[in-house]
Image: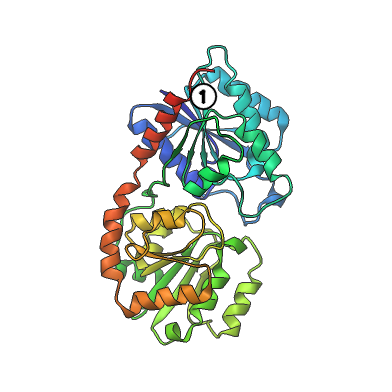
Amino acid sequence: MRIIILGTAHPFRGGLASYNERLARQFISEGHDADIFTFTLQYPGFLFPGKSQFTDAPAPKDIRITRVLNSVNPFNWIRTGFRIRKENPDILLIKYWHPSMSPSFGTVARIARNNKNGRTKVICIFDNVIPHEKSFFDKLLTRYFTRSIDGAVVMSRSVGEDLKSFRVNIPVAFNPHPLYDNYGDKVSREEALAKLNLDTEFSYLLFFGFIRAYKGLDLLLEAFADKRLRNRKLKLIVAGEFYDSDMPYLDIIRNNNLEDEVLILDRFIREDEVASLFCAADLVVQPYRSATQSGVTQIAYHFEKPMLVTDVGGLGEIVPDGKCGYVVKPEPIAISDAINDYFSNKRQEEFTKNVREEKTRFTWDKLTKAITDIYNKAGNK
């Protein structure tokens, strides 16, 4: 089967690129002919909230990645659509995360699938249908894109419900986010702490990923100021680039005298640093105000780390409460109660064992099977 993945990949960085590259490898390992068409321009520089869109890591040698799509140039969308139509793939696979990509993705999809023999089917993997940070044009843009696809895979049931607002006449599969197993092998806690130059006498919480208001870092910082936690040898690692102002978070730290207990790595975390951060952590915390699903949980599963997540979107579907971690309300007291319970009652060994068993649910071959099943159900156009 010939598959073209349209979306983020090297030289662009981050979870979207890692996901698409790992998925391409899985298809190739199963004997499919798969490659990636990525952006020449993903975001104009003035619209990108971080410091850089690009990685300085070398390009993967085992995947064909071609830079073709300019997200803001309509003439380019037409050229890209015709180029893919000429390739005549069985599947054009698009990973969708934000309405700003709807015009380019939707136009390319319409052209690519309109070939004479009706062979190409457009399948979308939805991170979100409705974005975390909403704007006036979201529904219009999302409707334009969703009308260009033949089938979909959703990674949380809440996203599946959102999709029903736009399309009900296409096959849809629910398949959780697979493990991010591309960040290396698990290392010992001692090795990880030594690499990070951290004190072995302390326990560590990890908040990982870029920082925006909806991710609730402020809730975690307020929870971390709880006296029950201050009386423990406990530190919080915040590893990720601020995409919003850091001042509200720094104010919470100063107001609660947390300067010595909170370690902030305000930058993009390289792939070769991920293993050390997760293996040093005793508990991974995702205090999100809103979410659909998260790649961070799948990194934690890979490194067999218990998690604390909030009961928003699909996070509770992925982390069984009281088994692999905690699912709590997005409130400081609920977060601090769970952290206190974890350390007071020495849950780590039990939860880690359960995480090790639960992670077998999240494999890449299950995702590729879901995609090919959708392809077979999509029908002829």
Residue 198 visible somewhere in the drawing: no
378 or 79: nearer the viewer? 378
- Locate residue 281, reporting x and y percent: 38, 68
Q: Which residue is mark 1?
A: 121
- Answer left or right for 27 relative to 169: left
Image-quadrant location for residue 86: top right
Q: Amino acid at mark 1?
A: Lys
Q: In the image shown, does 333 or 254 lie closer to the viewer? A: 333
Residue that appears at 28% across and 60% down: 354
Residue 143 in the figure: left or right of residue 153 = right
Q: Is residue 238 above or below residue 370?
A: below
Front in this rendered view, residue 67 or 210: 210
Specify the color scheme.
rainbow
Q: Residue shown at 40%/69% (left/top)?
A: 196
Q: Is residue 213 above or below residue 377?
A: below
Q: Position of residue 211 (x, y in %)?
A: 57, 62
The residue carrying pointer 1 sits among few (fewer than 14), some (14 to 19) or many (20 or more) residues within 10 Å by Cα, namely many
User: Is residue 367 visible in this depiction of the protein?
Assistant: yes
- Label 1: which secondary element: strand
